Amino acid sequence: GYVIADSGKIMIDGKELGKDMDFPEGLGALIETPGFIWYQSGFENLRYLARIRNKINDAQVKDAIRQVGLNPDSKKWVGKYSMGMKQRLGLGIALLGHPKFLILDEPTNGLDPQGICDMRDLLKRLQEERGMSILISSHMLAELDKVATDFVVIRSGKIIEQFTKEELLERCRDCFQLRVDDVKKASVILEETCFVQTYEVLPKGI
């Protein structure tokens, strides 16, 4: 199994990625802004990378491009792509070889609101249709809230906190304070009349 250690290292079955083992099968990654050959098409770019890995044929390259909503038969140079199309093609690189675990670094970086929405929908579809686990590194909490199920907070390369989406919602929910003369009576009213079960009694009748 994949484990993100407190040190920020990625451990796979007890071995450190990049030190004890090479890039493993079943893992795809996109590091913020991918590099492309600007005067080639999207298919030509991905086919070049596929040949380096030597295990991915042209049909799989085209499938990866279709998965991200681009046309694998388009002759348009990547240099003429919009930012959203470049991010999609970068994700296509990470999808080469049908990985089971995907690591993405700021996948919505530089995108306009519609591009962010499209990327979010694409990631949801990949997870639902292919059962893929996705690890996203981002500082955009409001956007992560729409796609993530679990959160890890990292500071200076160290994991300082982990929580589920449900726990995050519990922390961030709206609340209000009441100052009352009789805390016990107010508690009864909250529970029996207002059907409120989640409240906290603080000092000074709050």
Image (cartoon, helix red, strand yellow):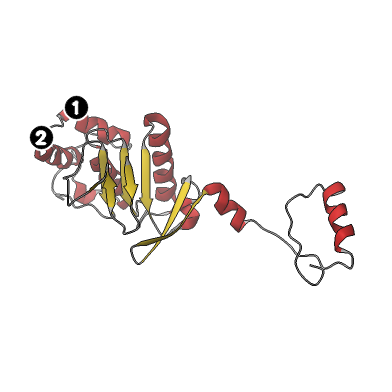
Q: Amino acid at mark 2?
A: Asn
* Most distant residue in the front direction: 14
Circle 1 SS class: helix
Residue 107: percent from left, percent from top:
34, 51
Q: Nearer the viewer, residue 113 or 29?
A: 29
Q: Quadrant of residue 176?
A: bottom right
What residue did someone put label 1 on?
59
Residue 189, x across and y down, in percent: 87, 53
Callout count: 2
- In this picture, residue 201 sits left or right of residue 118: right
Q: What is the secondary structure assignment of the residue under circle 2? A: loop
The percent coordinates of residue 36 (x first, y second) are 17, 50
Residue 98 shows which numbered tag?
none
Q: Residue at x 17, y 52 (%)?
A: 19
Say whether residue 137 is visible: yes
Residue 84 can be seen, yes or no: no
**Which residue is nearer to you in this view: 118 or 27?**
27
Label 2: few (<14), some (14–19) or many (≥20) C-alpha neighbours in 10 Å: few
Q: Earlier in the sequence, mark 1 or mark 2?
A: 2
Residue 26 quadrant: top left
Q: Would you call the spot at circle 1 few (<14 residues within 10 Å), some (14-19), or many (20 or more)?
A: few
Q: Between label 1 and label 2, give the one nearer the viewer.
A: 2
Q: Nearer the viewer, residue 199 or 59?
A: 199
Give the position of the C terminus as an image quadrant.
bottom right
Residue that appears at 31% across and 57% down: 8
The residue tagged 2 is: 54
Location of the N terminus (image quadrant): top left
Q: Amino acid at mark 1?
A: Ala
